[in-house]
Amino acid sequence: RSPPHEGEECFSKLDRAVRATKRTPPLPPAMLEFAQQQAAVCEKAEAEKGRRNAEEARRIAEQQAAEEARIAEGKAAKEARRLGDGGFERMRQQLRKSHESRIRGALQGVFGGKIVLNAVPLSPAVGKQFMEALQANPVEMRLAFHGTNPANYGSIFERGLLIPGRGNELKIIHGAAHGEGVYTANLDAAWLSRGFCIEPTMLVCAVLQTCKVKHVMDAMIVSDAAHVVPLFEGVGASFSVDRAGRRPAVAPAPAIPATK
């Protein structure tokens, strides 16, 4: 027998409606059909409630992760400022320690196979330029992705991420819909940088959140090359999404608030 539920409808909850469809002796046909319909409605409502709860839990977890990331970025920036020009490598090590799991998770959304994360062989002059900008701007620092042809890596590691036409021979290839600058993608939007990759590899960069950075949805456009620096190269075995962010029908074969 169903537990008593004085003042409540017999079919207002999923367990009651289901029990009603299985009772002995059975309900009259019309009432049985109604009980079955109510059971389906309640089941759908329960599923939707579960989905909403899961979505809320995911949102809260993402907010907590983002806050932890900002704190870690702030600590790394503070330590780098304290150490001055010699703090670049220390900063990079700290950011890897605090963000590696998040970086790998983001790259796994666009690359297939094992993700390899390597520190890029950056020229001392580029690292020094970024550290000087960091010292001069006590602002938040964030990590971001930058997708490009890996044939450009040698030049990037030697000269930094340059803005085409500003004292260099580079030309704009993919357009500049949101103005001139170095285009990067937020750490939770690797798919955006994926659109500029021709091989399963992209750069992980640090971006100073100065007035030289324009935020456009999931992108950060940096109009001062000194305020962005490549830290790591993330490499996968294959692409798991195409340039539009769509997954293939057949899976590919394995192949910071800163403190002064």
Image (cartoon, helix red, strand yellow):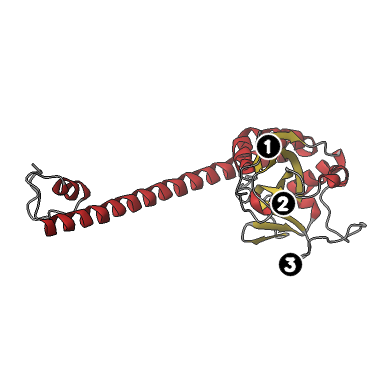
The foreground one among 236 and 155 is 236
Query: Badge 2 local density, few (<14 within 10 Å), some, or many (20+)?
Result: some
The foreground one among 73 and 65 is 65
Q: CA distance from mark 1 to mark 3?
A: 36 Å
Q: Is residue 206 above or below residue 224?
A: above
Horizontal relation, residue 260 to residue 183: left or right: left
Task: Residue at 38% x, 50% y: name it.
Answer: 51
Mark 3: amino acid: Ala
**Among the 4 quarters of the image, the one containing residue 94:** top right
The foreground one among 213 and 115 is 115
Residue 224 on image: x %, y %: 79, 57
Q: CA distance from mark 2 to mark 3?
A: 27 Å
Q: Which residue is mark 1?
A: 79
Which of marks 3 and 2 precedes in the sequence?
2
Which of marks 1 and 2 precedes in the sequence?
1
Task: Kindly report which numbered mark, 2 or 3, lies closer to the viewer in this rendering.
Answer: 3
Q: Which residue is mark 3?
A: 177
Mark 2: amino acid: Asn
Task: Residue at 72% x, 33% y: name it.
Answer: 90
Q: Which residue is mark 2?
A: 137
